[in-house]
Image (cartoon, rainbow, N blue to C red):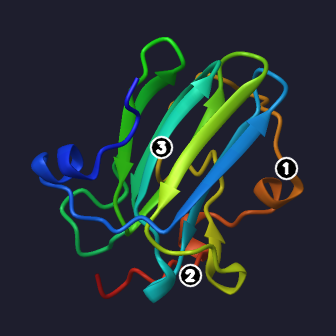
Amino acid sequence: MESWSKREFEASGFHYDFVQDNLSASAVKGTLRGIHFQRGDKAQAKLVQCIRGAVLDVAVDLRPSSPTYKKWAAVELSEANKRQVVIPRGFGHGFLTLTDEVEFLYKADNPYAPEADGGIRWNDPEIGVEWGIEMPILSEKDKKAPFLKDAVTGFETW
């Protein structure tokens, strides 16, 4: 299968210059990663796909000036359906593993920058993502993520 074509991507109206590929691996069903983003000029657009197993993939609009601010969208991505999703700059991103042994691949149009790393609590009631799980497996980073009202996203002027 052809998993990436710049020509096809641009023909669909997307014009990102991807500079980095990342692979995330999760061993256990119920692992939740996110809601993550990078701030300011280090923000990233991403093209994401699940190449092993299945995930519920979530994007949240974090741009206060946007008519869809704090709205979220979710889609199942899996090795079986081979779907891909574009996450624009200014959006938070997260996913929940629906199977064991998940591999999640994403392209980014800006390199990872630890100093610009940010996150929002996965269960922030102001956003209200319906993950379908009450007790996910979380990293220490995700357990400590702030609620949106306390977070600095760097998207305030977007």
Q: Which residue is mark 2?
A: 152
Percent position of residue 34, x then y:
64, 51
| The quadrant where residue 132 appears | top right
- Label pair 3/2, CB-CB below 8 angstroms: no
Q: Is residue 118 visible to the viewer in this orientation of the structure?
A: yes
Q: Amino acid at mark 3?
A: Val
Residue 99 at x, y percent in the picture: 70, 16
Quarter of the figure that contains the N terminus: top left
- Please state the horizontal and vertical placement of residue 46, each as a whole percent of the image: 44, 56
Instruction: Tell me the SS state at disc 1.
Output: loop
* Circle 2: residue type: Val
Q: Which residue is mark 3?
A: 48
Q: CA distance from mark 2 to mark 1?
A: 20 Å
User: Which is more N-terminal, label 2 or label 3?
Assistant: 3
Give the label, 3 or 2, closer to the camera: 3
Q: Which residue is mark 1?
A: 139
Q: Looking at this view, is 82 or 64 the one in front?
A: 82
**Residue type indicated by callout 1:** Ser
Furthest-right residue in view?
A: 140
**Which residue is pictured at 37% across the width and 84% down the height?**
156
Q: Nearer the viewer, mark 3 or mark 1?
A: 3
Up/down of 99 relative to 112, above or below:
above
Q: Is residue 131 visible?
A: no
